[in-house]
Image (cartoon, rainbow, N blue to C red):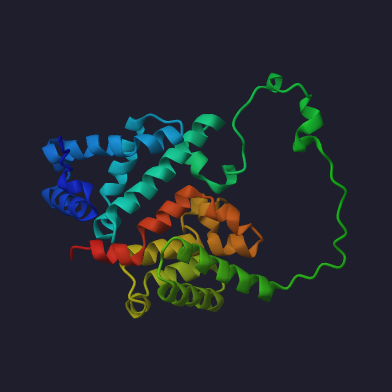
Amino acid sequence: MLQTTQPAFATSEGLRVLLVRLHDAGPGAWRTDPEAAALMQYTIRKYAGLARKHRQEPEDAAPAAFDAMRTSSVRGADDPWAVVTRAVDITLKADEQAAGMLCSTHQARRAEYSGFHEAERFSDRETSITEYHPAFRVEAPEDTDDESDDRSEQARRALEETIALFVALDWPEDVTRASIEYISGRLIETGSRRAAYESLRRDKHARALLDMPRVSWTTLLRVVLGSPDPTLVATNTGRGVLLRLTRGYPVAEIAADDDLALTIILANPITVRGGELT
């Protein structure tokens, strides 16, 4: 009986060994190493079904896998193939949405585009667009006289939802809760997200106390408090998850942001710590 021998990198531990070797050999190793080329061919075959599920070609899976495989998070993960598969699925899904909505893959990853449907011609439907499209409907104003704005409760709920978002993406709950509550406390002390970000970024004592790798810590600050880049201040990236949840953004909408999810996954303190070489 003919038996097919699987390459060593087909297992998670074998993949880790290969990725560490390629990392140690330097950036040129991916171009010249025969085993790296074999890995890419194997990746195309492995994710062919996933690519077809998202209406993509099998070859489209290779760049997504390549980008993930070069990160320390994959090298240090308990199951490197599982992290690669998640990254490939997110990228292929974004590529599919981008093709349908006639926009870039980067835009398709953003949460603000998650509710959009694929582009279609007006003539594709028998009913006039004014009859079915919600943009042409006028809702009666709601009576808001009796609404109460309990900011304290809203802030507490936003804090819990932020913690739950990270935990759902496999961050350890104890470290996540302690870190985000620490960030929240500093935010209250400083009175502004930017001041809190700069203060915490330099707070080596807090990072050591929380046993948080530098990459994970800076990513956590940027995701929770928002990017300090002035050009992003009016974007979701600039606002940060905590502010968006406090303002009433649905947590499901934020969780649907594949780009954000991948950022959180790749910064997992457990996998980052496992992948650090020094």
Please report the residue visible at 42 percent of the width from the left and 31 percent of the height from the top.
56
Please report the residue visible at 40 percent of the width from the left and 38 percent of the height from the top.
50
Q: Nearer the viewer, residue 34 or 10?
A: 10
Up/down of 22 relative to 275, above or below: above
In x, y percent, where is residue 230?
A: 49, 54
Whether residue 124 appears in this view of the structure is: yes
Q: Quadrant of the C terminus?
A: bottom left
In x, y percent, where is residue 158?
A: 60, 68
Up/down of 259 relative to 55, above or below: below
- Whether residue 88 sits left or right of residue 243 in the image: it is left
- Whether residue 81 sits left or right of residue 178 in the image: it is left
| Residue lying farthest to the front in this orientation | 1
Q: Nearer the viewer, residue 257 or 6?
A: 6
Q: Quadrant of the N terminus?
A: top left
Query: Disc count in the image?
Result: 0
Whether residue 33 appears in this view of the structure is: no
In x, y percent, where is residue 169?
A: 44, 60
Q: Quadrant of residue 178?
A: bottom left
- Whether residue 77 sits left or right of residue 168 in the image: it is left
Please report the residue visible at 52 percent of the width from the left and 78 percent of the height from the top.
185
Please report the residue visible at 51 percent of the width from the left and 69 percent of the height from the top.
163
In x, y percent, where is residue 274?
A: 25, 65
